[in-house]
Image: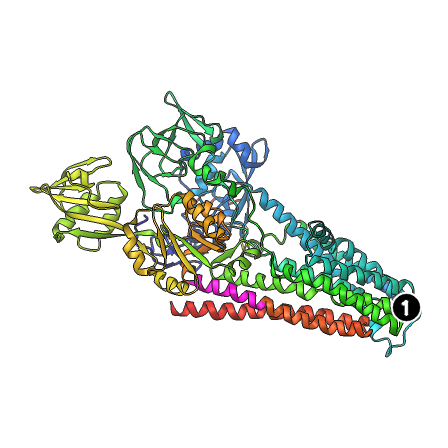
Amino acid sequence: MSNKVESLTECSHCHQPFKGKTYSDNLGHEFCCFGCKVVFELVEGESESLLIPDLDSATYAYLDSPDIKAKLLIFQNGNTEKINIHLPQIHCSSCIFLLENLFEVHQGVLQVTVHFSRKRAEILYDAEKIPLSQLAALLKHIGYPPNFEEQRDENEKANKKSQSKLLFQLGVAGFFFGNTMLLALPEYLQSTILYDRGLLYFFRYLMLAFSFPVLIYSAREYFTNSIASLKAGVLSIDLPISIGIIALFAQSSYEVLSGIGPGYFDSLCGLVFFLLVGKWYQQKTYENFSFDKDYKSFLPLAATLLINKDESIIAIENLKKGDFIIVRKGELIPCDGFLISDESLIDYSYITGESQAVSKEKKEQIYAGGKIESSSAIIEVSSRSTQSYLSSLWSKDIFKKEKKKSKTFTDKISQYFTPAIFVLAITGAVAWYFIDPQKSISVFISVLIVACPCALALAEPFTSGSFMRWFGRFGFYLKDAQVLQKLSQINDVIFDKTGTLTEQSTVKLKWTGKAIEDEDLNKIYHAAQQTQHPLARSLQSYIQDQNQKEIKIHAFQESPGQGIYFEVGDDQFKLGKASFMGEEKVFNGTAVFVSKNDYVLGYFSFYHQMRKELPEVIADLETKFKLNVLSGDTDQERAQLESIFGKNTALHFEQEPADKLEFIENHQKSGDSCLMIGDGLNDAGALKQSDVGISLCEENVNYFPACDALLKAESFKNLPSFLNLSLKSKKIVHRAFALSLAYNILGLTFALGGFLSPLVSALLMPISSISVILFTTFSAQYLSLKELSRKAKIS
Amino acid sequence: MSAIYILIIISFLVALGFLIAFLWSIKSGQYDDDYSPSVRMLMEDQIKTTKGSKKP
């Protein structure tokens, strides 16, 4: 499968381009998913695909054990059970259609509700008619293999709660802002409209009443945050905002209660409303990716325990040293151990990013997280899954502490801003004391009101919010706004090699040795067909392009872990390791040697295809950053990398995960800001340690280590643009700050001059906020489109 | 002129009703998933299978 030539196909139903596995019908239509196929058939007439054969649910048998079930189900009442499953393959409207109509396919399913953006489905089913294992098998059959490993995430819940709270506060603030504005309007037209005194007071008291929910509920966080920051000895931007809000409220209440004027209630509500809009805009999250995961989400839930040839299901926490477990084809190894059965092929791509399976022999040590590619393997557990090599990558101290938050530009400014305002307010008050003592206090208050840095506080959220949205549209997903800011400070870029610089799916072959005849190649092709070894499969797809003729192979023999022997006519061939031919190992890397009649003709070497856009990306980055490559492999590809990276890049080979982490730590100690780009779990430590850890992923977006940002492989070419844009985002924030400071200075001249009226405040405040919002969002859009769509056109 | 006092209070109460409706809709999760409902409403109530099984 992995060697199949992958090209983009268009789905006959939803017209989305897609890669990889297709569902086709007899008429030559190709579909991106089972759902599309079913819907297409239904539109044409009737669907045959909906007749589901009896499914083999053995691989999911562990799901029926009560222990496991208790962890997964969200509700159980008699036979009626409810589960919330992550189905990573959900991607189009037909998927929703098919899943929500699953009860038509199987009677046992009662109700399905799909949550599209989270790629989850809530399924209510009758466990007597369809046990959980059957349900999982059914979902897999229709193309949505469930992912049980990543179950309910506590973070997700907390996040959702805070998000809906913000929406609540925003709703309340917006509602009272609108009403207060309407009530305040007659005041500004007072001179032109004949005005009833009673009505005037009625309106003013209503406004006073309306401001309470805004002050107490919606603006609450600003007060609590500024108290918290004061306790920590920091002057955050929340402090001048809170002071402004309190000053507004105090002055307005005084004016209304003493009957002097209408107060600034509309400004107060508007201010809080705009601030909350900024907060909400920045809170763009990508729900379907969880950026913080630990090793548990990569391991299966249960293993098949073997005691005296009896199989039983056991939760992986209960595995002990010395237990024997069976891991079947396609399953993940839950813990470290020794292979008891014969040779096995293990795919460690989740761990190392290397997609080529490795073969392990009897008694060899194997690690958790690998996927068994050959028929089932028996493993003797050597350590519990919590102590496996994989989990040790997580147990490093680095995962226990949160990444330190860097100070935002807003924070830096506000350190000077707050004292400056107080100085201004006091000098203003003192100066007025000598001119007109009665106005002294009102000038003091109006300076605090007008200096409230609403527009200032909006500049950064709106800039980063818009850039995050644009990055997301081009396949680069940031965890939060902090990441964007840190990206702009990077001066050191560190690449993992396998899977990051190289393509994850394709392996290239090169023939070294004597010229090999097409006829012999053809023989090798047919011999390779008879073995399941992954190298043989790569070999096949390499030769396939040449010629194919039917050939009789006889005396075929496979020596596990060594190679194959076969005869064609009178010629004897050997394919495999150098030692299998009785040769010295002359090649430093993966190679398959070929011998004919005991004479070694040469060898096929396997190497990774570098991403084709790599030279372009490197040439671009080279001029701006220090580049480093950390590879876990041997230096087999050194020459190739050097030709791309040039002499200035440090290439490090044979790096263990811990080495990578240390490498970054050392660079940070010397004052560098590091960007690490990796893909496998072996990079997890390094990604966490770096200032910004980007994980690169191909279509399968389920398996990526904890990171700050996710970059789709097809957007790798845009990496320089993203880094460039993050720098530009900083400039935009600076300009937006200048703009809002200009408004502040304008307002301050009014305040210090003693002319600040509710009307001026009511006009100035929204104008400054809205112009900052428009400026930041439009410049972000303009720059992103200019930078990114230009690249898209070229490639 | 005094009618306006009553009218303003009534209009405020009506608006308050909409605010509560909005908060309710947040709470019931209407803003959680903004894609599936748009597809869900286009679905047919029944789909035909070749079994010809007609549901009541």
Q: Residue B45, position in %: x, y?
A: 55, 51
| Quadrant showing the C terminus of chain A | bottom left
Indicate left or right for A152 with A366 as reference.
right
Residue farthest to the top, as pictured: A308
Q: Chain of mark 1?
A: A
Give the percent coordinates (x, y) of residue A355: 34, 46
Front residue of A534/A650: it is A650
Q: What is the chief secondary structure element of the magenta stretch?
A: helix
Determine whether, in the image, residue A619 is placed left or right of residue A430.
left
A768 relative to A67, above or below:
below
Amino acid type, callout 1 = Ile
Residue A703 image point, x, y percent:
44, 46
Read off the magenta span.
A718-732
Name the residue located 36 percent from the left edge and 22 percent from the top edge. A309
* Residue at the far bottom in the pictured view: A192
| Residue furthest front in the image | A670
Find out whether residue A42 is within the magenta segment: no
Left or right relative to B24: residue A445: right
Q: Quadrant of residue A342?
A: top left
Residue A609 seen in the figure: yes
Of the pair A269 and A382, the residue shown nearer to us: A382
Residue position for label 1? A260
